[in-house]
Image (cartoon, rainbow, N blue to C red):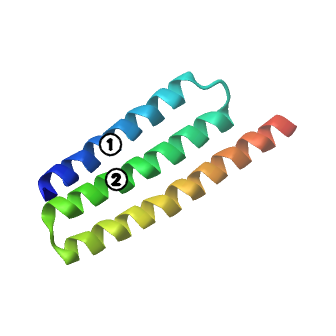
Amino acid sequence: MAEFVGLTLIFCGIAFFAAGSVGVLRLPDLHSRLHALTKADNLGLGMLCAGLAVLDGGVATAIKLFFVWLLVLAASAAAAHLIAQQALRQAEE
């Protein structure tokens, strides 16, 4: 049962990665693209990490994957903010 749950989470995470990639390619402006990329990829990575933690079954691995996910959340939020801020500055000029 754990294998089924783990693989389901991993495939759902992959689906969110694909949706974020489609959003980057299809959405009209920079802010919409950033939103699609950060939201979908962060949720996809969370599901992927959760699936890997379930498949591994170890607490130490789950904690490490959780911290990796938190670091990526912080980094992607900061990067998206900096990109949007720079785009706003260029639009004002």
Of residues 46 and 2, which is closer to you in this image? 2
**Along the horizontal axis of the image, is 81 left or right of 21?**
right
Image point (21%, 76%), residue name: 59
Question: For the residues marked 1 and 2, what is the alpha-carbon distance in whole angstroms?
Answer: 7 Å
- Residue 93 appears in the rendering: no
- Whole-percent x, y for residue 26 in the image: 55, 22
Element on which disc 2 rests: helix
Of residues 19 and 1, which is closer to you in this image? 1
Query: On residue 27, which mark appears?
Result: none
Q: Is residue 83 above or below residue 93?
A: below
Q: Is residue 78 above or below residue 34?
A: below
Element on which disc 1 rests: helix
**Along the horizontal axis of the image, is 65 left or right of 20?**
left
Q: Which residue is mark 2?
A: 47
Residue extending farthest bottom: 60
**Along the horizontal axis of the image, is 77 left or right of 42?**
right
Instruction: Mark 1: give few (<14), some (14-19) or many (20+) Cα within 10 Å.
Output: some
The N terminus is located in which quarter?
bottom left
Image point (25%, 70%), residue name: 62
- Whole-percent x, y for residue 73 in the image: 48, 60
The C terminus is located in which quarter?
top right
Of residues 81 and 26, which is closer to you in this image? 26
- Whole-percent x, y for residue 60 in the image: 21, 77
Q: Earlier in the sequence, mark 1 or mark 2?
A: 1
Q: Amino acid at mark 1?
A: Cys
Q: Amino acid at mark 2?
A: Met
Q: Which residue is mark 1?
A: 12
Instruction: Mark 2: give few (<14), some (14-19) or many (20+) Cα within 10 Å.
Output: many
Q: Is residue 28 above or below residue 60?
A: above
Image point (37%, 70%), residue name: 67
Image point (21%, 71%), residue name: 61
